[in-house]
Image (cartoon, rainbow, N blue to C red):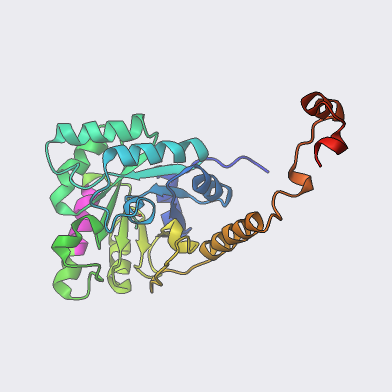
Amino acid sequence: MAEKRALNIVKMKKMKQEGNPITMITAYDYPSAKLAEEADIDIILVGDSLGNVVLGYDSTIPVTTDDIVYHTRSVARAAGNTFIVADLPFMTYHGSIDETLRTVRRIMQEGHAHAVKMEGGAEIALQVQSIVQAGVPVLGHIGLTPQSVNQIGGYRVQGKDEQDARRLMEDAKALERAGVFGIVLELVTEEVAEAISKAVSVPTIGIGAGRRVDGQVLVFHDVLKYDSDYREKRFVKTYADIGAEIRQGIAAYVNEVKTRQFPAQEHVFNAEDTVIAGLYGKVKEEAVK
Ligand code: KIV
């Protein structure tokens, strides 16, 4: 089989033009990224959802640049033939351009990402432009933007009224003018997501944004139910239940250790009889009595 080659932003635009859906999934560590690459995913996102699903926070806000760099580096080691996008964490692109570029430099040079993702619309266009001018591809992200959850007032669907729909459309166009190579649309009504996808030349990648976008992204732990108290979400389809598999596997291990079924003879390394005799001064049979 021919080796997989990482996608690039030129090919992504072509995929949109040809109606070939782009697939993206989050991953945060070596094994998950390796499995995603083996499953032929187009893009891996080291999302700041890392805060919720890996680090145990109740939002993405506490996730730091150090966290993103650390996790992106392990993903990059695993998935050398996949396009890797990493999130710019909360408030790392709202100060000076210099500070923003320093954060991007770390994520690219230390994390080995191919691109960064930023939440926001027209209000961050200047920062997006500066990063793109520095030679770094930027993926936009509008609709429900979890870093602003306290301002939005919760995780609610966007684009439900005309004013909101117009704002989303203007934000998408502002991001396109600023040079993004694609736009994530999160929790957006299907009709508004379709209108945006038709209005911009760059691919749109939806999560809870319906069917008429140019690609889909989901969180690794949602796709696989990799959580002990997984909560169903309407916009997610689960394809496996590895949480239950893991729990059963660990419980079986605990039970076998408690009942002395593990380790069994096949898991044991035996010494030669002469070694036993040397240790105990007796032959093996007598020594182990
Ligand atoms: O952080 C993340 O995982 C994301 C996706 C939900 C798009 O931003």
Residue visible at 45% across and 53% down in the picture: 15
Q: Nearer the viewer, residue 255 or 36?
A: 255
For residue 122, side relative to residue 231 (left or right): left
Q: Is residue 135 visible?
A: no
Q: Residue 262, can we see it?
A: yes
User: In the displayed structure, does residue 245 sit left or right of residue 90?
Assistant: right
Extent of the magenta region: 168-177
Q: Position of residue 237 (x, y in %)?
A: 47, 69
Question: Residue 223's spot in the image, x, y percent?
Answer: 47, 62
Which residue is more in the foreground, 93 or 70? 70
- Residue at left 24%, top 70%? 156
Classify residue 80 as left or right of residue 255: left
Image quarter for residue 197?
A: bottom left
The residue lying toward the viewer, choosing from 80 and 49, is 49
Residue at 85% across, 34% down = 284
Q: Which quarter of the rendered image does ligand 1 occupy?
A: bottom left
The residue sitting at the top extreme is: 278
Looking at the image, which is closer to me, 159 or 148?
Answer: 148
Tell me the quarter of the image containing the N terminus.
top right
Residue at horizontal 32%, vertical 52%?
Answer: 51
- Quick check: is 175 in the magenta stretch? yes
* Quarter the C terminus occupies: top right
Query: For residue 239: magenta?
Result: no
Q: Is residue 99 left or right of residue 48?
A: left
Prevailing secondary structure of the magenta residues: helix
Residue 106: where, in percent of width, then height?
30, 31
Question: Is the residue 116 above or below the residue 271 in the image?
Answer: below
> In x, y percent, where is residue 79?
51, 40
